[in-house]
Amino acid sequence: MHTFIAGSIIRGDGMSTSLNYLEGLARHYALRAVMHDREGNIGEAIKFYREAVKVLKKILKLYPDNGLLHVYREWIKQYEKRIKDLEALRSRMLLPAQAGNDVNLDIDDFIVTEKPNITFDDIADLEHAKRAIKEAIVYPTKRPDLFPLGWPHGILLFGPPGCGKTLLAAAVANEIDGVFMQVDAANIMSKWLGEAEKKVALLFKKAREISRNGKPVIIFIDEVDSLFGTFSSEVGGEVRVRNQFLKEMDGLQNKNKKDFIYVIAATNKPWTLDQAFIRRFQKRIYVPLPDYNARLQMLKLYTKRIKLANDVDLRKLARMLEGYTGSDIKDIVVAAHLRTINELFDKYGGKGEARPVTWNDFMEVLKDRKPSVNKDIVKVYEKWYEKFKAL
């Protein structure tokens, strides 16, 4: 059981977490929903889609300044639409063979209508990733005449959760003024035979139409391992979807076509992807834990709109936060600031101004905040990078 309190969650064991935990919880519910959806358990699928929506709405409420709000809203829209479709199917009690023709394959639902408000300048550090993305996407889009041999159309971003992979993808669409299409397991997979493959084909068909009308397209696949990873328990549906996707990716490499379509995939588990899938991504970029300079840059970015006391030494704090992800660091700043707000309400009923955030506020938060990524898993990422890196 979980209780939501002012930007954090108090779990049954008394431990508190915040944004990172909420995002993981939403993803967990969404994947459970997809599993039941594919197996035909309509009631369970509806239940878990609703839980995912509930958590995502909680994120919107607690973190109104989060740069990924447009992504969360799009997920909510897609999950609520799937709930509506499933409820309609359940009410009509259609058989699978009949229902296949009734399921809505409107690919416009994949398009994120709210333009991402993230740019490369908003992302601390990750200069190697920004450079690789500019070479693969930004430069070819602006000057295709300089690339007679073509350019990469597939970019794989991998690394620990909370280090900026999704932010990078969102920023690209803004840098090239492109159309951003969001794909995940919940909005692409289906239990109806053949529907998921059709969605993949229609997704790329729509992208080609947009591109030929003068707009570049970013197809972003978050948690790509949940869609295209290899698992011992996978069934024919997953294999067909993966094969259809690989076929579409091959089509993007046609030198006679100058479509500005780019597939950016993000994963926390690159080792689950098979070799055929990895080969389609000419750029494979490791998004690591932030180093000292990146942590300092993040702290300056996240604290620029709050008042800090004179005793706060961001350089010292950046050194102390070695091993923390970018998401961890943001949560720490939010939690420290929240201490001043709680104090304002407890002592003054919410009247007046909150005091500046002090060094002690940060130290109190760090007593209960450990890095969300284990050091051992970082070594696994680095080993995989050495084997498959392609900048």
Image (tube, rainbow, N blue to C red):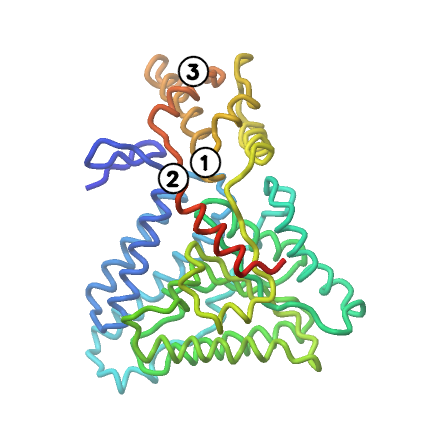
Does 40 sit above or below residue 52?
below
Which residue occupies the foreground of this view, 143 or 55?
143
- Of callouts 3 and 1, the N-terminal one: 1
The disc at residue 169 is none
Q: Amino acid at mark 1?
A: Tyr
Q: Residue at x 58, y 28 (%)?
A: 304
Q: Residue at x 47, y 16 (%)?
A: 359
Q: Amino acid at mark 3?
A: Asn
Residue 22 location in percent, x, y?
Answer: 34, 44
Residue that carries the numbered disc 2 in the rendered image: 372
Q: Nearer the viewer, mark 2 or mark 3?
A: 2
Residue 168 location in percent, x, y?
Answer: 57, 51
Residue 124 location in percent, x, y?
Answer: 59, 39
Where residue 189 sits, quadrant-wise, is bottom left
Q: Residue at x 23, y 40 (%)?
A: 2
- State the CA–CA distance, disc 3 to disc 1: 19 Å
